[in-house]
Image (cartoon, coloured by chain):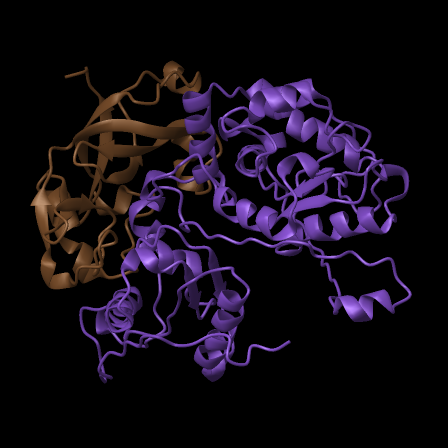
Chain colours: A brown, B purple
Amino acid sequence: MTSEYKKPLPRPAMNPEVSKPFWEGTKKHELWMQYCLNHNGHFFYPREVCPICWAPQDRLVWQKVSGKGRVFSYTTVFQPAIPAFAEEAPYIHALIEVDEGARIIGNVIDIPQEDVAANKLEVNQRVEAVFEDVTDEWTLVKWKPIGEG
Amino acid sequence: MSLRGEAAIIGIGELPTQRSTPGRSMLGLLGDAARIAIKDAHIRKEDVDGIVTEGGATYPASVAEYLGIRDVRFGTGSSMMGASGATGIAIASMAVMNGLANNVLVLMGVARNPALGGGGEGFGGPGGEFEMPYGTAAGANTGYAMIYKKHMDQYGTTQEQLAHVASNQRFNALENENSAFKGQAISHQDVLDSRYVNYPLRLLECVMPCGGAAAAIVTTAERAKASLTNPVYVLGVGTALDDFGAYPKPEFTTSPVARSAPVAYAMSGYTPRDIQFAEFYDCYTILEAMCLEDAGIAPKGEIGPFFAATDTTYKGTFPINTDGGQLSSGQPGLAGGFRHVIEGARQIMGKAGVRQVARKDLCLVNG
């Protein structure tokens, strides 16, 4: 599988040790996010300091979250910056707000291509995480539309 | 006037110096130092409204985003090598004594983490890990398109309305010798017919990267009066900073102008209604539109109808980006944002030639 995947893989540049539980989670097809024991809330992306209350690292734990949320906003990419995405274009690059409150970037998939091209996706569409094992090492989290409730 | 006695350091934070900092990043270490400093100063995180970082490897906006500092009124880099920290204190002093911020956090530091290459210079944002794998569009298109879509959903703004931003500015650029699009007319329909780069952003709603440069000279009012020029006086300034990336910010469709413009207005003694013309940063139609409403040129959420109903060319009732702006002149790096200052000054000096606006004395500029 590894040799076939031409698109960019995650490059953990901030701190690979801090974001590791996130990627270990996706490998198990689970969505994990950091939770701050000081102010009792989730946040994303992974950090060494809580961005809400500056609690230090030892007050931050990882929790499995529901994997459900809504499309906060999105763009349909007709002209990708990275050539490897060209054959898939147009596709949806979205900002998802998970039910636990944090926001995360991902693609919304499982939509008929003609609807993608016609920008039919609605803001606030309910979505659920799905996991794509793109290489032996990496599993990306993507999102598919689901019904309300 | 000097800053003598006008500002003070009220808290300090320092981490133990270590040969290596395994498991830690520069951003994480900066956060730990910041926590110690606010405790020492007896202030809360929410009281921090200014930030000075090194500015090269660490953008103030990236550090503010990582640390979740929400209301940054003043942020800048201090890229002075070993003197960056001391210069940062001088800059912070100037900011607080002039009312641009109350509590400025000056932050410098570096990690030496073997997992990050160990060299110590390592700094990376979240983009390569959490955005790129999902196929971003070129430049800043991805974030601004999502802001555009959210604005449409939230306020009913339409692409037809914002296309006027691009077509009116092209009219302004037609006789601008310095515009990359001089003489190349486009209509409102041309904007709507241009292809999507990434929905809802069409090609003619995005800037074209170019080469170029701009410069300006600032002196004291006293010297200006004695000079052989027609001076352009700075009457009010407000600054504010937002997250580097679009996605963590809670106020998705509100720009930092909502916080900077009131400061500039209050300092100047003028209100939005007094403004005669505007030169506003315009990397994309949506960004310019959103900033204009945040500056009170139209009520929040009503900038779409404003553009549909207002002639914003240099001949119009409220001229905006009278030289074509970046959208119709090109974006020569940071001179692109600087052009709004240059054109505003040019108009006030009365040197804008054929595109000279009728009411030229009070301009609002956003960079």
* x and y, in percent, of residue A120 in the image: 39, 16
Residue B355: % across, % down: 85, 38
Q: Is residue B257 above or below residue A97?
A: below
Answer with left or right where residue A110 lies relative to residue B6: left
On the picture, is B286 further left or further right than B279? left
B321 sits left or right of B133 in the view? right
Nearest to the observer: residue B270 or residue B329: B270
Image quarter of residue A49: bottom left
**Would residue A46 be visible to someone looking at this image?**
yes
Q: Residue at x 90, y 38 (%)?
A: B354
The spot of residue B340 in percent (x, y) is: 69, 48
- Check the picture and name the quadrant holding the N terminus of chain B: bottom right
Q: Position of residue A140 (x, y in %)?
A: 22, 40
Looking at the image, which is closer to me, B213 or A130?
B213
State left or right for residue A97 relative to residue B351.
left
Residue B50 higher or lower than B363, as above or below = below
Q: In this orientation, does residue B332 appear?
A: no
How many numbered tags mark residues here?
0
In this view of the protein, which residue sits in the foreground, B227 or B128? B227
- The residue under the point 20% across, 61% down is A48
Q: Is residue A43 above or below residue B184?
A: below
Task: From the viewer's side, name the closer residue of A82 and B317.
Answer: B317
